[in-house]
Image: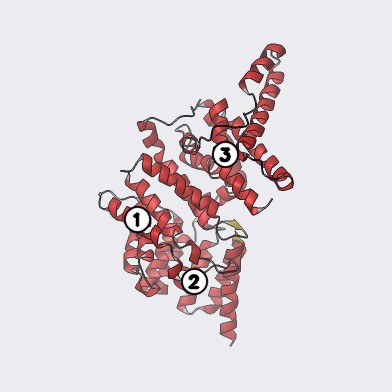
Amino acid sequence: MTPTHEHLLREMAPQVLGAVVRRYGDFSAAEDAVQEALLVASQQWPREGVPDNPRAWLIQVAARRVTDQLRTEIARRKRETALVVETADQQVAPAPDHEPEKDDTLLLLFMCCHPALTRASAIALTLRAVGGLTTGEIAHAFLVPEATMAQRISRAKQLIKKAGARFQMPSLSERDERLEAVLHVLYLIFNEGYASSSGDSLQRVDLSSEAIRLTRSVYHLLPDDGEVAGLLALMLLTDARRAARSGPDGEIIPLDEQDRSLWDQQAIVEGVELISKTLAQGAVGAYQLQAAIAACHDEAAHVDETDWPQIMALYGLLKRMSDNPMVALNHAVAAAMVHGPAAGLELLKGLDDDARLAEHHRLPAVRGHLLEKAGDVPRAIEQYRLAARRTSSTPERNYLLMKAARLKERSQS
């Protein structure tokens, strides 16, 4: 399947799922049917071409799968065949060639974050249904084995079915109850798009762009919510650096080496305005703090002008709000920029026993970076190589191995 076909299918998937769920009301059956339709399209479209109306084509194929599932269930239960099949044909007729172009993705997003689910299950299900992430990618984001995540998603779909969740925008109280999970899902989708956890590409622009689009929709729905505005600002300020993050061959260019003239100034202005407005409103949440950190980076015309003491203080506040080990890693880097690499390395010691980082590449990568700054070349090389073995992202692996090779060459010259 070509990248063009893959991008189109990923873009269509949540819209098609929303349409099928709206029609038949069974989330689990609809999700399975849409996945089958996507598989058929991935095999057929490269050979025969993309249909004139790819969305309607996918809905029609998915509808036929739902029909097959219903008929199988009817046969299994040995109901009165003639009457039930007739009813089934009426209920699950194939989609018309010109399905109304209605985007139900936002409704689908809130439905996946149903209160019947645990927060972790809701997020995992939404990443699968709305974000289009694979089970492996979701497991990586949650720092758990893939088999564990597969079971979690399967249970979540069954719970949605048992709860009788309706495909409609929740009430105000229900919306508030689900909002935290919705924002976390959008955050994870954006992160997977901005820095892909696996594969040959550093970035998946379709994912990050979709996350920004959906977050804008939530922001228009809830313009006075500080964390919604903070998340949108964070995405804009982070995505603004996208064009400078990789070289002509897809290689990673770290933040301190990027050509800042390539940064999207329009996105930076919008993001800074958003975070400045929401910070002035009072209560501050984690997304607002992260957006403020991103603004510190984006507003520095040169890397030497970065306000690292402010960034360190903001990460300190984030650490008190959350036990996320990634926040602790970033705080260690900021501390190293303010107080020297020894201070950062000392902070990393507290993460060595964190099971969530046991097989993650970020900890040895950060330790290698700080050891390099401290002048401990042999240990820095060792940590870079360890990080390279742990990552499933080809650009990340190449970058880490390049760092190790250059350090070794420099030490031998």
Q: What residue type is labelled 3?
A: Ile
Q: Position of residue 171 (x, y in %)?
A: 38, 30
Residue occupying image coordinates x 54% and y 66%: 246
The residue tagged 1 is: 289
Which circle marks residue 153 in the picture? Answer: 3
Query: In the shown orientation, is residue 96 left or right of residue 369?
Result: right
Q: What residue type is labelled 2?
A: His
Q: Earlier in the sequence, mark 3 or mark 2?
A: 3
Q: Position of residue 304 (x, y in %)?
A: 37, 75
Q: Mark 2: which secondary structure? A: helix
Work out how far the residue at label 3 is from the one at label 1, CA to CA, in angstroms: 30 Å
Q: Residue furthest bottom?
A: 413
Q: Which of marks 1 and 2 is nearer the N terminus?
A: 1
Work out how far the residue at label 3 is from the one at label 2, CA to CA, in angstroms: 36 Å
Q: Where is residue 218 in the image (x, y as percent from the top left)?
A: 40, 42
Disc 3 packing (10 Å; few <14; some 14–19; many ≥20): many
Q: Position of residue 64 (x, y in %)?
A: 67, 29
In this rendering, the answer to whether 397 lies above or below 290 is below
The residue tagged 2 is: 369
Residue 355 in sight from this viewpoint: no
